[in-house]
Every structure is written in structure tokens, then in C-alpha cells.
Image (tube, rainbow, N blue to C red):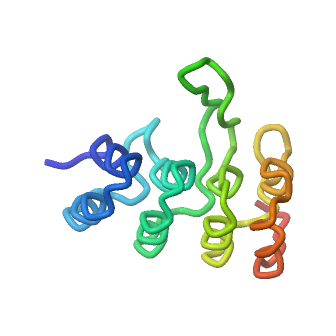
Amino acid sequence: MFNDSQLLHKVVNGDLPGVQELVNAGVSVNGNLRPLRDIPLILATVEGHIRIAKFLIARGANLESACLEDVGNENGEMSARKGTRALHLSSSPEMTSVLLKAGACLNATDADGCTSLVRTGGGDGTRAAQGKCRPQVDH
């Protein structure tokens, strides 16, 4: 039986065929178990796996899923604040564009009240895609 951990492993490693196999076998694109629920799209974004992100979105991934708590990296440094969404963590113009075109909310805030524009420094990808997003303040 396949599970969330296997999906996350394949997402992190950029294994699109493996991700497709697991999702086609019934693993949820949003994950099922806390704390792993809603993390696949965030991980695909962090790792820069655009094709996997597109696949997850096409299969119904929740664009507004957020980290449930602050997340640190292996060095003990803060890597994502509670409330952080995939768009907050996008580091490339192409990934930012993919997320915004799919409907990610540009105005969604993390636990610090920061939008993706603040977190990404308003990089070219966010500015370029900004006009493609319907401003929404009620997220």
C-alpha cells in the first residue's frame, strides 16, 4: 500500500513518474495524515520541481495549503513560518507564474503577516505574474 511519506519522498527527489504512479494509485495530492497533510505542493515549490507542481495542481492540490507550524532546516534555521504557502516559498519566476496562473492568492499572509511579495522580495517572477492574479484580501 502506498502512503504520504512515499509521495513526499518522490516529490523531493523530482520523480514525476513516481508521483504520478502514487497519485494514480490513490494517494491524495494533498496528503492525508498530519503533519504531512497539504505539504506535497509546498515541497515541489521549494525544490523547484515545476512539472511536479503542475501535475499536483492539475490533480487538485490545494494552492492555499499552509504550514501548520514553524519549520526549521537541518541547521536549526527557520525555513518556513507558520502559515507559509507554496507561493511564499517560490524562488523562480516560472514557479511563481505557475502558482499564480493556477489561482494562488497573492495577498495570503503567513504568521508574521507577510505576503509572498514580502517573502520573495518582490522578485521579477512575482511582479511579472502580479497582473494575472485577482487580488483577494479575505484569505
Q: Nearer the viewer, residue 60 or 53?
A: 53
Depth order, front residue of 76/35: 76
Q: Quadrant of the C terminus?
A: bottom right
Q: Is residue 4 left or right of residue 68?
A: left
Estimate the x, y position of residue 68 in percent, counting from the top left.
Answer: 60, 38
Residue positioned most to the left: 1
Judge by depth and name the residue closer to the eye, 30 or 74.
74
Relative height, residue 27 to residue 103 (above, below): above
Q: Position of residue 18 (x, y in %)?
A: 25, 58
Total of numbered circles in the picture?
Answer: 0
- Name the residue located 59 percent from the left edge and 63 percent from the top edge: 63
Q: Position of residue 12 (x, y in %)?
A: 41, 46
Image x and y of residue 138, in percent? 81, 63
Hey, which residue is sitting farthest top in the picture?
A: 76
Q: Residue at x 83, y 80 (%)?
A: 131
Instruction: Please tell me in which quadrant of the rendered image residue 136 appears.
Output: bottom right
Q: Locate residue 45 relative to residue 24 in the image: left or right.
A: right
> Would residue 110 be found to the left or right of residue 51 on screen?
right
- Between 122 and 69, which is closer to the camera in this rendering? 122
**Picture layout, residue 5 above or below residue 122:** above
